Amino acid sequence: MGVVKTIRPYHEPAGGWGALKAMGTALAEQDIALSGMATLARMNQHGGFDCPGCGWADPKNPSPFEYCENGGKAVAWEATTKRCTPDFFAAHTVSELEAFTDFELEMQGRLTHPMRYDAYTDTYVPVSWDEAFAIVARHLKALPDPNMADFYTSGRASNEAAFLYQLFAREYGTNNFPDCSNMCHEATSVGLPQSLGVGKGTVLLEDFEKADCIFIFGQNPGTNSPRMMTDLRNASRRGATILSFNPFRERALERFQAPQNPVEMATLTSTPISQRLYQVRVGGDVALIKGMMKRMVEADESARTEGRGPVLDWDFIHGHTIGIDALIADLKATQWGDIERKSGIARADIAFAADAYMKAERAILVFGMGITQHRHGTQNVQQLANLALLRGNIGREGAGICPVRGHSNVQGDRTVGITEVPSDALLDALEARFGFSPPRAPGHNVVTALEAMVRGEARVFIGLGGNFAAAIPDWEQTQAAMRRLDLTVHIATKLNRSHIVHGREALILPCLGRTELDEQAGGPQAVTVEDSMSMVHASRGHNRPASEQLKSEPAIIAGMARATLGAGSRVAWEELIADYARIREDIEAVFPIFQGYNERIKEPGGFHLTSLARERIWATPSGKANLLVCEGLCEDPAVDDPQALWLTTVRSHDQYNTTLYSLSDRYRGVYGQRDVLFLNETEMNRRGLKADDRVDILTLSQDGIARAVRGFRIVPYSFPDGSCAAYYPETNPLVPLYAHDPQSFTPSSKGVPVRLVKTTTQPGAQ
Ligand SMILES: Nc1nc2c(c(=O)[nH]1)N[C@H]1C(S)=C(S)[C@@H](COP(=O)(O)OP(=O)(O)OC[C@H]3O[C@@H](n4cnc5c(=O)[nH]c(N)nc54)[C@H](O)[C@@H]3O)O[C@H]1N2
Ligand SMILES: Nc1nc2c(c(=O)[nH]1)N[C@H]1C(S)=C(S)[C@@H](COP(=O)(O)OP(=O)(O)OC[C@H]3O[C@@H](n4cnc5c(=O)[nH]c(N)nc54)[C@H](O)[C@@H]3O)O[C@H]1N2
Ligand SMILES: [Mo]
C-alpha cells in the first residue's frame, strides 16, 4: 500500500491503458499474473464461470475478452495464492485483529479451514465441519422461537445455494431473510411492482442496440458495471443521445477508451459518452424527473393547441395506464422555482433533457444506487416509471426501464425465494413440494433485523457471504448489538470485519468461490445465476480449490440443515448435494417460470425469465400500469441547520463494496487515501474551509444520538451546492438506522444530512 497520498486530477478518458495497467497490478498483487490470465480467459464464456463482479448481462456471443478491469480485480481477489490459515489465527488474538484495517484483513488471502471462536484464548481455532454444524444446530434448537434467528444473504450466492438456504430457514421455521438487496435495489423491488406489476427491469442487452436515447440516473457504469461501457460506447457511436444525471461528473459517463478496441488504444482516442451531464443535487431526483414530466405535459398541451401531433403517447396512456389525471394535476401544481431549487438544475437545462427524451422514438432509463438509497427511494423509482410510461417506453423494442443490479446474482437470489415477505403462492408451492408447513408471518429485512438485535430479541445470525457488520448503517449501535448475539456464523471466502465483530460464540465457514471446481458425489457441478436482464445461465469453476477443507455453499447449508432438522427433515439434503440438477428440479417445481431448467441452461448464453411488463401485461390489481403521484419534492424531514449539507456515500473505482482493492480512486484523482470529503468551493468558502483542511462530519440526527466520523480531508471538487460526498463504508457510522425509506426500508445512504466542524484533534495516523 505504498501509494503516496495525493490528489491529482485525472484528465484521461475512462478505460484505456490505465484500465489494463490496473488489472495487471491487481493480478500481480495476488501473485497470480499467469494463472490469473488463464482464469480470466474462462470468465463469462460458455462452459466457464460467471464473473463474480457485477450483474451486467453477457452478450450472446462473448468476445474472448469478456471481462473488464474491475471484473479482473474481482477474480484476482478470489483466485489469489495468499492463504489465511489456522497459523495466522493462532498468531493473532481477535482483539489484535480489531486493529487491522479492512484492507489488511482481506489481504490475508483465502480462508482455508473452518474456525471457531475460543473465548478463553480470544482466538479463532480450527474446528471440524461436523463440530461446526453441531454448534449451529445446538444454538438454533435452543431458541424458544425460530424468529430469533436471522439468515442473511449476500448477492453472490448462486440460485442453488440461495434456494437451499431459504428451504433450510423455512423448514426450521422463519422468514427472517435480511438480504444485501435490502440495502441496495429494494426500492426497485417494492416500487416497480406498484407501477408496472414486476419488480425487475424490462430491457435486454439487444435493446441497447436499438435505443436512440439512454438516460442514466445515479449509476456509475465505468466503475460498477464496466462491461456496460461497451454497450454505451456502441450506442454513442450510432448517434444515440445519452444524458447522465449525477452529482459527480463521473469520468466514464463523459469519455471512454475501450480497452478491447485496438484503434482507440493505439491512437489514444476515445468515445464521448454523455452529451450532457446534469449535476443534480444529492436527493434532488424527484424534483428533476418531475421537472422533465412537467415540461412534457406543457409541450403536449401547446402542440395540441397548435394542431401538431401529441408529445405524450396517449394511445398507450389510455390503453395501458391509470392515473394520468392525478399525475398531470400534481405536475401542474409543482412550481418551477421549487423544482430548480431542489434539483439544483435550471429550468432551461431540464427542458433540454425533456426535449431530447420527447424526440426519441425509443428510450431506455437506466438507474442505480443514486436513485434507490434514499428515504424517498421508492418514489424516485416510481417517478422514473412515470417518465417511461408517459411516452409508452415500456414493452417496446429498444425501450424500457433498466435498474442495474449490484451483486452478480442478487436478482436470482430473490427469484428463488430469498424474501422476508413471501407470497402465499411461494409458500403453498413449498408446502406442496416438500410437505412441511412453512411459516406464514413476514420476517426481518436488514433494518428490522438490526432493530431486533438492538432490542436484544434476535440471538443468532447466519451470513451466507457478504460482510454484514461493515455494510450496515449506524455502526456504533448496530455493531454493538451484533457483539451481544449468542452466535454469529459466516460462510465466507476471506476474512472480514464481520468475523471480528462477532457474537459470544462465532464460526467462520470457508467456502469455494465461483472460479473453483465444485466436485460432489455425482461429479463436477455447475451452479446458475440470473443477471440484471433476467438471463439465467450456468457457471462452472475450473481452478483447484484454495484448500482441501473447503466446502461448497450448498454443501455447507445442507450440513447445517441436516444437523439442525435431523431425521425429521422433509428434504433429501444429501441427494441434492450429490447432484445440483436435483436442486434445480426442486426450483422448477416451486417456480414454474423455470420450466425445463436443466435443459435450458445448456443453451449457450442461458435463457430469459420473461418479465410480464416487457409483454405489456400488467400484473397489478387493476390490470393496468399505474402512474403514481409523489406528493411534493421529497424535502427530507426538516433540517433547520443553515449549515446543513446532504452527504452521499459512494464507491471508489478500487473497491468492491466493503472489499478495498487499494486506497486510490483513479478517475476522481484520489490516491492512497479514503478519508476525504468532496465539496465545492462555494460551500468551502461559506464555511471558511480550504483544500486539505481536516473536518469532522456530524450527522444532524433526529434521535439525539451523536454520530460522527473525524479527520476527513477536504477535496475541492465540482459538486452541486448543498451536497457533499465521501466513501462507503467508512461513513456508514453516519447513516442512522431510522433513516430509511418507509416503504422499502432501504437505508438512506445516499442522503444523510450532515454538518462539518473543523477537526481540532490531530488526525494522527489518518
Ligand atoms: N467494481 C465494483 N463493481 C460493483 C460494486 C463495487 O463496489 N465495485 N458494487 C456492486 C453493487 S452491490 C452495486 S449495488 C452496484 C452499485 O453501482 P452504482 O449504482 O453505480 O453505485 P454507487 O457507486 O454507490 O453510486 C452510483 C452513483 O450515484 C451517484 N449519486 C449519489 N447520490 C446521488 C443522488 O442523490 N442522485 C443521483 N442522481 N445520483 C447520485 C454517485 O455519484 C454515483 O456515481 O455495483 C456493483 N458492482
Ligand atoms: N453507506 C453505504 N452503505 C452501503 C452501500 C452504500 O452505497 N453506502 N451499499 C449497499 C449495497 S448496494 C450492498 S449490495 C451492500 C453489500 O453488502 P455485502 O454483500 O454484505 O458486502 P460485500 O462487501 O459485497 O461482501 C464481501 C465479503 O463477501 C465474501 N465473499 C466474497 N465472495 C464470496 C463467495 O463467493 N461466497 C461467499 N460465501 N462469500 C463470499 C467475502 O468474505 C467478502 O469479505 O452494502 C450496502 N451498504
Ligand atoms: Mo448492491
Image (cartoon, rainbow, N blue to C red):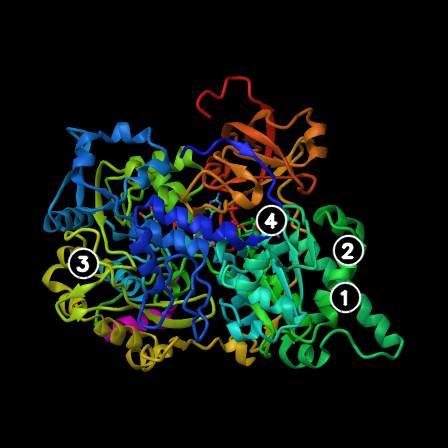
In-image side of 50 versus 532 (left or right): left
* Residue 638 higher or lower than 691, as above or below: below
Question: In 3D space, how far apart are the residues under numbered discs 1 and 3 (Cα atoms)?
Answer: 57 Å
* Residue 219 higher or lower than 319, as above or below: above
* Front-lying residue, 225 or 25: 25
In-image side of 115 versus 710 (left or right): left
Q: Earlier in the sequence, mark 4 or mark 2?
A: 4
Q: Is mark 3 within 8 Å of ligand 2?
A: no
Q: Are marks 2 and 3 in contact (CB under 8 Å)?
A: no
Q: Is residue 497 visible from the viewing direction of this image?
A: yes
Amino acid bearing label 1: Asp
Question: Magenta residues, as a range?
Answer: 421-433
Q: Nearer the viewer, mark 2 or mark 3?
A: 2
**Residue 576 occupies which quadrant of the picture?**
bottom left
Disc ID at residue 12:
4
Q: Residue at x 29, y 55 (%)?
A: 35
Q: Which residue is mark 3?
A: 561
* Front-lying residue, 584 or 385: 584
Q: Is residue 432 visible from the viewing direction of this image?
A: no
